Image (tube, rainbow, N blue to C red):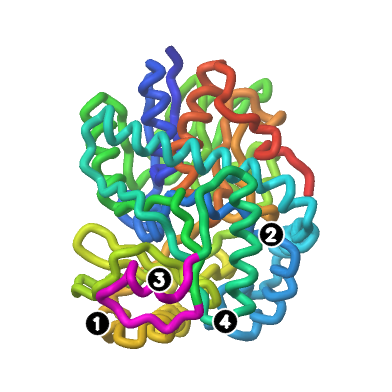
Amino acid sequence: MKKVIVIGGGIIGLCSAYYLHKEGHQVTVIDQSSMDFGASYVNAGYLSPSHIIPLAAPGVMKKGLKWMFNPSSPLFIKPRLSSDFFKWVWAFNKSCSHKNVTRGIPAIKDIAVLGQDLYSEIREVENFNFQLEKKGLLMICQTQKMLEEEIRVAKIAKKEGLEVREIGLTELKKMQPKVELNAKGAVLYECDAHTTPKTFMEEMKSYLKAWGVMIHKNEKIEDLTIKDEKITSISNPTHTYIADEFVLAAGSWSKKLSEKLGIKLLLEPGKGYRINSERDLGITMPAILAESKVAITPMQGFTRFAGTMEIAGINHNINTVRVEAIAKATQRYYPNIKLTTEEKKAATCGLRPVSPDGLPYIGRSRKCQNLTIATGHAMMGWSMGSATGKLVSEIISDKNTSLNLEVFHPDRKF
């Protein structure tokens, strides 16, 4: 048994704590927030092996530059005078290649498939009640060009063994009989599932507490003590914590702590927004509005509208232009659905940690022997959360990992 401290109480941190506890370790979770908001609570809730193409793909940087002056665009990169930001942009641009996509596809698929299986296993074994429905995921297209692009991606997914098929407008409308749809057609990923994130997070926190995992909220770790390439303690002005092993799963804040160890994680926070509606809107199928990159999910008691990737530094400021973009996109595809002023005013956001190549950092850096890094999952943190937690526990328990982690190595070069 090892004494393990997990820095970060989001989906990655909690799942790491869960599997470490299952391995018999003594676990403490420390988070700088109240652990009831952020990316782990406001995401679209998808368990989506379908998302096999990494964020850094051919043409994405070109689009990013084009959209840089459009604050309502799906991807908004706000320029700022920072050497770390320029290094990330340079690496991101370099990663927008066919080579990165080819390398990333099997790795993303494998960890997302494992993640989906593990969510089901957790629900069954622990008698959790969180929503877990496998209705699939629709990629709804309004133009022939986008439909052809989605069909091209679907063919790649099918070669990877994922269940996916094109559906025509007639079948699409039969699947969503209670709503009016303005679309050309769609691709249906039958392999995908969806959840209500907050429910899972609350159940997992309750489980961990009940089984003796210590959870410290509103505790910001500010310093690390290192000896012989090992962390001996972590601290802030009021507390010092000692452990055998440490897990860095602090999302977009992971970069700052890693720098204290001489580890240069290229990481940028990607802000995403969500609007909830508790009205019965008639939407029963999870869908992504392909041209607008807006995700719509029927959750427990409400419908969630989520989207955008805003690279603009660490902040939780609500950009009403981007909130409005989600609402307008929704109405373009669902003409009878108009999100209210009150619903839009209640919009919130979360910061997703984005690596330059769109792949997470999972594993030990060569610069620190007792630190396992688990961050950088971008838009796939929820899909990969349970699998990442299991991989972290396998690393710390000195077991063979369920997946080959070389592609996710924290020290990889860009």
Residue under label 2:
56
Q: Amino acid at mark 4?
A: Thr
Which of 1/33 is in front?
1
Instruction: Give the residue drawn at x 26%, y 24%.
Output: 212
Instruction: Give yes or no for residue 299 being in the magenta stretch.
Output: no
Q: Is residue 112 above or below residue 240?
A: below
Residue 323 relative to residue 340: left or right:
right
Mark 4 or mark 2: which comes first in sequence?
2
Mark 4 vs mark 2, CA separation in Å: 23 Å
Which of 370/299 is in front?
299
Q: Which mark is residue 172?
A: 3
Q: Is residue 251 above or below residue 183?
A: above
Determine the secondary structure under disc 1: helix
Determine the secondary structure under disc 4: loop
Residue 227 relative to residue 281: left or right:
right
Q: Nearer the viewer, mark 1 or mark 4?
A: 4
Q: Amino acid at mark 1?
A: Glu
Q: Nearer the viewer, mark 2 or mark 3?
A: 3
Image position, residue 330 (x, y; %): 40, 80
Q: Which residues are magenta?
A: 167-184
Residue under label 1:
342
Whether residue 392 is visible here, answered yes or no, is yes
Determine the secondary structure under disc 2: loop
Q: Is residue 290 above or below residue 49?
A: below
Residue under label 4:
143
How crowded is the residue under tag 3: few (<14 C-alpha within 10 Å), some, or many (20+)? Answer: many
Q: Amino acid at mark 2?
A: Ala
